[in-house]
C-alpha cells in the first residue's frame, strides 16, 4: 500500500505511469549509466546500486538490484560482499576504494577529498570509474527517495520481477514503453 490515496496498491510502475514526463528521461539516463560503456560490469553497477539502496534503507531497490546483479552473472558471494561488507573487508582489493568512495559520497558528501579519488585511481581504475560511481550513487539516491517517499511496498514478487526485468531488458525498456504509452494507465 502506498502513501498516495489515488494509488492504494501502487507499484513503482504505477508511479512511472503517473509521471511519464519524469520517468522516461530518468530511465534513459539510468540505461546509460547502468548499461552504457563504463569501467564497471553491469553486475557490479547493480551491486553498487543495491549497496547505496541498502544504506538508504530502501528495501525494494536493494532487493531488486541484488536480483539484477545475480541475473547478470555476478557471483553470490561477491554480490553479498559488495552490498553488505565494509569496504576494507571486500575480497576484491581494487573495488575497496570504490566502495569506500561510494559510502562516503552517500553518507557525507561534504567530507569527500581528493585523497578519496586518488585511492580509486591508485587501485588501477580510470577517472571514468569515479564519475560512474558518483552517478550510480546519485541516481539511486533519487530513486530511493521516490520509492520510500511515496510508500512503494517491497514484496518479494515485485522486487524479483523488477530485478529480472532490468537484467533482461535494461532500463530503457521502461522509458520506451512509457514513451509508446504501453504502460500508461
Image: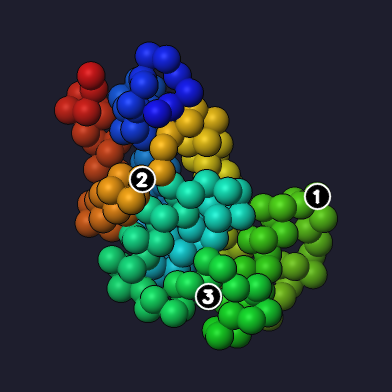
Q: Earlier in the sequence, mark 3 or mark 1?
A: 3
The residue under label 1 is: 110
Left of 157 or right of it: where is 106? right
112 over 117 or under it: above or below: above
**Circles 2 and 1: CB distance less than 8 Å?**
no
**Relative vertical location of residue 113 with respect to residue 59 in this rendering, above or below:** below
Instruction: Please name the residue that numbered disc 3 is placed on.
Output: 81
Which residue, as the protein is rendered here, is positioned at the far top? 6
Question: Which numbered circle lies on residue 7?
Answer: none
Image coordinates for residue 181, horizontal then vertical, percent:
20, 24
Rendered location of residue 91, percent (x, y): 56, 85
SS type, badge 2: loop
- Quadrant where the N terminus sits is top left
Residue at point 57%, 76% (across, down): 95
Q: Earlier in the sequence, mark 2 or mark 3?
A: 3
Local crowd size for mark 1, using a 10 Å CA cut-off: few (<14), some (14–19), many (≥20) = few
Which tag is nearer the camera, tag 3 or tag 1?
3
Labelled pair 2, 3 in contact (Cβ < 8 Å): no
Examine the image and state in which quarter residue 153 appears.
top left
Image quadrant where residue 79 sits: bottom left
Q: Nearer the viewer, residue 86 or 95?
A: 86
Q: Mark 2 and mark 3: span between their CA atoms?
A: 23 Å
**23 relative to 180 in the view: left or right:** right
Q: Can you see residue 132?
A: no
Left-right relation of 124 to 32: right
Say which element carries label 1: helix
Residue that carries the numbered disc 2 in the rendered image: 155
Asked if one can make out residue 17 in the rendered structure from this viewpoint, the answer is yes
Q: Whole-percent x and y of residue 65?
A: 40, 56
What's the CA distance linking mark 3 and mark 1? 26 Å
Q: Secondary structure at mark 3?
A: helix
Amino acid at each position: 500500500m502506498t502513501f498516495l490515496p489515488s494509488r492504494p496498491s501502487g507499484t513503482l510502475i504505477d508511479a512511472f505511469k503517473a509521471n511519464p514526463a519524469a520517468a522516461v528521461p530518468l530511465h534513459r539516463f539510468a540505461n546509460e549509466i547502468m548499461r552504457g560503456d563504463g569501467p564497471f560490469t553491469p553486475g557490479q553497477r547493480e551491486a553498487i546500486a543495491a549497496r547505496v539502496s541498502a544504506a538508504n534503507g530502501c528495501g525494494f531497490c536493494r532487493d531488486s538490484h541484488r536480483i539484477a546483479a545475480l541475473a547478470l552473472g555476478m557471483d553470490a558471494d561477491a554480490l553479498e560482499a559488495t552490498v553488505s561488507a565494509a569496504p576494507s573487508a571486500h575480497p576484491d582489493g581494487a573495488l575497496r576504494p570504490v566502495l569506500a568512495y561510494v559510502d562516503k559520497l552517500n553518507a557525507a558528501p561534504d567530507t569527500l577529498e581528493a585523497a578519496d579519488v586518488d585511492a580509486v585511481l591508485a587501485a588501477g581504475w580510470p577517472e571514468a570509474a569515479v564519475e560512474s560511481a558518483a552517478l550510480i550513487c546519485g541516481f539511486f539516491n533519487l530513486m530511493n527517495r521516490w520509492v520510500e517517499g511515496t510508500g512503494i511496498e517491497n514484496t518479494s514478487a515485485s522486487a524479483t520481477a523488477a530485478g529480472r526485468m532490468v537484467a533482461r531488458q535494461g532500463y530503457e525498456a521502461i522509458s520506451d514503453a512509457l514513451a509508446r504509452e504501453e504502460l500508461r494507465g
